[in-house]
Image: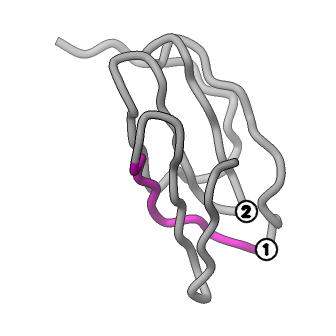
Amino acid sequence: SWNQITFSGENYLNGISFANSTTGICVGEAGSLFLTTNAGANWRKISGIPSTVCLTDVEFISSTVAIACGSGGNMYRSI
């Protein structure tokens, strides 16, 4: 079964990836990037991506590093 998650994001979301059972990142329009560390129960907005970028996908490449890509060929790596 599914439970709806209350989410404070104001933009469309396009991609999600989890590094493990608890830590995940969700990306979307206007540079939206959100992090969860409790399996999606709560999400925290992360700053640092310009609002002019529409992020279309994200993928964890290790347990601590994620790569996000977006419009105009933009790519961002977590630090």
Instruction: State the CA–CA distance, disc 1 to disc 2.
Output: 6 Å
Residue type, label 2? Ala
- Establish if 6 lies above or below 35: above
Q: Residues within 10 Å of mark 1 (few under 14, many from 20)?
A: few
* Main secondary-structure element of the magenta-colored stretch: strand
Which residues are the magenta region? Answer: 53-61
Residue 18 percent coordinates (x, y):
39, 34
Residue 15 percent coordinates (x, y):
43, 52
Q: Nearer the viewer, residue 61 or 15?
A: 61
Q: Is residue 34 inside the magenta stretch?
A: no
Residue 39 percent coordinates (x, y):
43, 15
Q: Residues within 10 Å of mark 2 (few under 14, many from 20)?
A: some
- Establish if 66 lies above or below 24: below
Residue type, label 1? Thr
- Establish if 44 lies above or below 51: above
- State the residue at coordinates (58%, 56%): 28
Q: Nearer the viewer, residue 66 or 11?
A: 66
Q: Which residue is mark 1?
A: 52
- State the residue at coordinates (62%, 79%): 74
Q: Which residue is mark 2?
A: 30
- State the residue at coordinates (62%, 23%): 43
**Side of 71 where 21 appears, left or right:** left
Q: Quadrant of the N terminus?
A: top left
Residue 70: quarter of image: bottom right
Q: Earlier in the sequence, mark 1 or mark 2?
A: 2
Residue 8 percent coordinates (x, y):
69, 28
Asked if the residue at tag 2 contacts the one at tag 1, i.e. Cβ–Cβ closer than 8 Å, the answer is yes
- State the residue at coordinates (34%, 18%): 21
